[in-house]
Image (tube, rainbow, N blue to C red):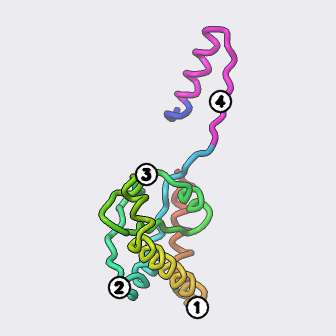
Amino acid sequence: MDVKSKVFESARQASRAVGAECEIDEGLVYAERNNNKALAHLFQANWETIGVEVVEPPKVGGIGSSDIGNVGQVTATIHPYIKIGESINHTFEFTDETKSEGGMIGMHQAAAGLAMTAYDLCTDAEALKNVRNEFENWKKENEKQ
């Protein structure tokens, strides 16, 4: 029995013990991220072309949770991080930096990198094949688990 099942069963048993009803509404679940390396390398090459320094992404998962993990269950995805200053994401300081000239430059670089990567996928059949193959292989591996 997995952890989620144990927690749900504990809640059900506790409610029965006190004569209460138990309804469990899971709500939105954020799936683990699947960073498609072939797609990430295309994006990286495009960013480097426009002079953006690229730092290697985390080897497993990512930082925090995001609904991009849910999208990554049905198609190839990446989750690039944009450096726009010295602040850490999800802080008031970072929010202020998003409004600065550096924030505008970072968003322009991100949009350009994404547009260039989309163009690559539309014009380079081999690149698209590599991205799709990696995703399909990942999907098969995860269906076994």
Q: Secondary structure at mark 3?
A: loop
Query: With respect to residue 70, does 103 lie above or below?
Result: below
Who comes first in sequence, dot 4 or dot 1?
4
Which residue corresponds to the image point at 41% horizontal and 74% vertical from the top-left? 101
Farthest residue, direction bottom: 123
Q: Amino acid at mark 4?
A: Ile
Query: With respect to residue 60, does 131 lie above or below?
Result: below
Residue on which disc 3 sits: 64
Residue on which disc 1 sits: 123
Q: Nearer the viewer, residue 139 or 77?
A: 77
Residue on which disc 2 sits: 51
Label 3–label 4 contact, CB within 8 A: no
Q: Residues within 10 Å of mark 1 (few under 14, many from 20)?
A: few
Q: Amino acid at mark 2?
A: Gly
**Would residue 69 be found to the left or right of residue 90 on screen?**
right
Q: Position of residue 88 (x, y in %)?
A: 34, 57
Residue on which disc 4 sits: 24
Q: Which residues are magenta?
A: 6-27
> Distance of mark 1 from mark 2, alpha carbons?
22 Å
